[in-house]
Image (tube, rainbow, N blue to C red):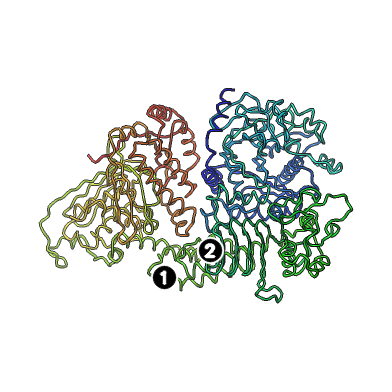
Amino acid sequence: MESRRRGSRLSRSRQRADLTAILRKSWYHLRLSVRHPSRVPTWDAIVLTAASPEQAQLYESQLKRAKRMGRIAPSTVTLAVPDPDGHRIGSGAATLNAIRALAEHYQVGSTQNGSLATVGSLAKKHILLLHAGGDSKRVPWANPMGKVFLPLPYLAADDPDGPVPLLFDHILAIASCARQAFKNEGGMLTMTGDVLPCFDATLLIPEDASCIITVPITLDVASNHGVIVASKDGFSSENYTVSLVDNLLQKPTVEQLVKNEAILDDGRTLLDTGIIAVRGKAWEELASLASSCQPLIAELLKSGKEMSLYEDLVAAWVPAKHDWLEARPLGKELVRSLGKQKMFSYCAYDLLFLHFGTSSEVLDHLSGASSELVGRRHLCSIPATTSSDIAASAVILSSKIEPGASIGEDSLIYDSSISGGLQIGSLSVVVGVHVPRDLGGVTDSFRFMLPDRHCLWEVPLVGCTERVIVYCGLHDNPKNVLSKDGTFCGKPWKKVLHDLDIEENDLWTSAGGQEKCLWNAKIFPILSYFEMLSLASWLMGLSDPKSKSLLSLWRSSRRVSLEELHRSIDFSEMYMSSSDHQADLVAGIAKACINYGMLGRNLSQLCQEILQKESSGVEICKDFLDLCPKLQEQNTKILPKSRAYQVEVDLLRACKDESSACQLEHKVWAAVADETASAVRYGFREHLLGLPSSIPASECQNDQVDGHVSRPFHSRTVKVELPVRVDFVGGWSDTPPWSLERAGYVLNMAIGLEGCLPIGTVIETTEKGGVLINDDAGHQLYIEDLASIAPPFDGNDPFRLVKSALLVTGIVHEKSLVSTGLQIKTWANVPRGSGLGTSSILAAAVVKGLLQITDGDESNENVARLVLVLEQLMGTGGGWQDQIGGLYPGIKFTTSFPGIPLRLQVIPLLASPQLVSELQERLLVVFTGQVRLAHQVLQKVVRRYLQRDNLLVSSIKRLAELAKIGREALMNFDVDELGGIMMEAWRLHQELDPYCSNEFVDSLFTFADPYCCGYKLVGAGGGGFALLLSKDAESGKELKHKLQNSDLDVKVYDWHIYLGN
């Protein structure tokens, strides 16, 4: 009880959770579950309810789109289930009907005795059910598309070449976090399609029960909603409370709340959010009931009654409601089938409840406190500011605006083509409107104005060639009746009728006994486009209200109501025309990018949208491919060849020419290597590819070779030993081609393992010419003819690192070994695939040793840059942070500046003895036993960068920014903040490539999580070493002991910061 009081008071004093952080985390989780569902489980099925078979068909198209765009995993079953025969049966019966349809999909039946064994396979599934049917009367412009699919461009700027985010997409993101709450036990999560609940949905759901998500609200809000009465006993944490549900109340008065003890200690009560999770036995029983529910639904249809999910069905899990429920339609069956299990309340204190119940609420969520999240221009074509008047706060999505148009403040334009001469006021909504340039011979002087606070949309009807133009006021409630406060275009009905000389019987018939309201008013004419626009102006009061000609034209036309529109929408035509419009718009953007730009857009992603034009999509992409030679010719001095080649590869794949794309891909990687070499050392590429002299070892022993006089042999030996590096944050920003085009920032640390420096080389001169190479694996190679050292190298060649070092140091081409030879020994006393930068640091050791023995420039900066080229020669790629980490002692913050040559600035952090001690007590360096190969991850990431994948670009930008923040944290001795930075960096690494982790690594981090404030794999990930930063020294000791005595096959290494002495 006390913990519950404390949690309630705490939630009131805290600021609500950061909406941006919640959505970013949820989207990250969604993408991870789609790209790597074996690591992060996803839903087995996603089911949407629909009002009619036609709407269900539209929803099926939207579900296919979501799969294509990476919102839903390919393995997930998707269904859209209409109410039977289009008759409303209530959300509870619709839930049973949807589960039954899914059971049929899985071919689950019920035996005569209703045995649970028949639904066992369904009961093991994890289902997301979204109620998306209904008629959206209060957001009528969203009625055709379905309110759940209305545009919501939160975080749209993160992926400017991706599709416009929809409310549905954000719901999927939030729901993806809830999937893990079910673990391996089957269950279902039910949500509503007009609410975005923003909270950390990693729920705690009691086993074998149902659980309803609640949030504390004030009593005035509660009076219009469902309220949950929760037990005073329960489990509480800082962010939530889980307790048994004692009762359910609907729109209660204060007296009812007091009587039922529903008021919390802080004076609020619990709102029913409409989010319900069912798990274990409760889900088995619900699935069993649903699998044989057809007779129950038939009985509902016969009686004309409905069964509510939020009043009837959930009441079966609340014993206090059983008597009431048994008097309701099918209530006895619900109690008999479901009443054995209980319902719990999961009270999420910081849940943000974004409701999209009215048009004004939609605009509020785009222009209010969440406006900084909104992408105000997304996949749109907008004219110059000198030829149009478009407010900066207007939200324009998937639309083409022509010169001469005007759009007011805070208006929403979506999926539309706005021609010149159209004026759209402030706080208005325009959806699916495509004004033709040719209005049937109308002169160019024609203008149309949509007043402030109005909505305008078009609807294609079955059997109708013209799309109907529909409009109303932003605050009109189509359900409000004529005799009370009903309005049309913001004016009372009586004023509209009086001003326009319209009779009530023009709009409503007396038959049927329906109340007269906007929903059933036959007010929208079906005429030519120009005539419909003219009558729209007249009906909105913008033309002469006493115009006899317009009144006559309106009266003589065929007219429809919103209700009739809802029943007659041509959903297939609407979806296809919208898809074609967006493909045409994207094609224009892609063409402009190729013709005028520097290929800064993600053409691979744009082409996926263009290909939705089944008839001409491939031909459009072929036209773009024909422009590539001209593009490279015009921009040869400033456009990186690697990017130009990647564009061509992407276009070839869009044109279904996979063979040519694969052949051209080799040029992409060769170009990256060339660009790296050019940036690191001016003229290096030409030097590298110059023809080497063929100098056999026997000739090296002559007194004179090509003018070089041999000197008496003097034996010389150099030994180079280096530490390994662990990186805290910033990796990937050091990797070409990113580091060749953008600044890079990395925070890392040099460490020794088990009391020694694990990487090293010994190089000594020999009287015998040639080069003898030995490594610690027992491999040996003698190279007599140095001319044989030439790229490309075999990926399995164990000596390619040393061969590449001989090339980049110039020893091969500058004839440094005319009168002497070399013996090179190398070792790396760390496990293979460690992620500690072993390969690069060993390369740095060899390069440094070779430069020492030949009196070359052995400065750390020169060595680091040469290793960058060396890795390109080897074919492994890689950045500069590994060699910097090993060459420079201690903790350092390193910046790279693009240019020719690439410049590196290493800033040592002057760590105090206290900081060094704190890190060595709290930081565990653990080998996971998982072998990883960096180049496999690296190639995926580099390819996405070359494609200009916006999510990848923003992720690396954030990693670079975190390196700066991490530097400040360490300088301020804030090790806890460093832990948070490591956690975010690890999330971003998984965003870059979900395969940088695996189930074993996930289990290790889950094991360590209670003891840690941060953890991550080092390097590119995929396995190797992990860093575990404990909450304090004591936690570090305890975690080390538990790891050493656990079933996890890991090794905790002793380590020390290498300070250079």
Left or right of 829, for residue 4: right
Query: Which residue occupies the foreground of this view, 943 or 346?
Result: 346
Which quadrant is home to the N terminus? top right
Query: Which structural element holds mark 2?
Result: helix
Left or right of 888, for residue 634: right
Query: Which residue occupies the foreground of this view, 112 or 881?
Result: 881
Q: Does residue 72 appear in this view?
A: no
What residue sits right under mark 1 in the picture?
A: 635
* Residue 6 sits in quarter: top right
Which percent across, then down, holds residue 964? 37, 46
Left or right of 615, for residue 880: left
Which kind of residue does numbered mark 2 sit on? Arg
* Residue 928 sits in quarter: top left
Nearer the viewer's eye, disc 2 or disc 1? Answer: 1
Q: What residue appears at the point 20 percent right and 52 percent down from the top-left corner?
A: 852
N-terminal label among 2 and 1: 1
Res. 653 mark: 2
Left or right of 627, for residue 49: right
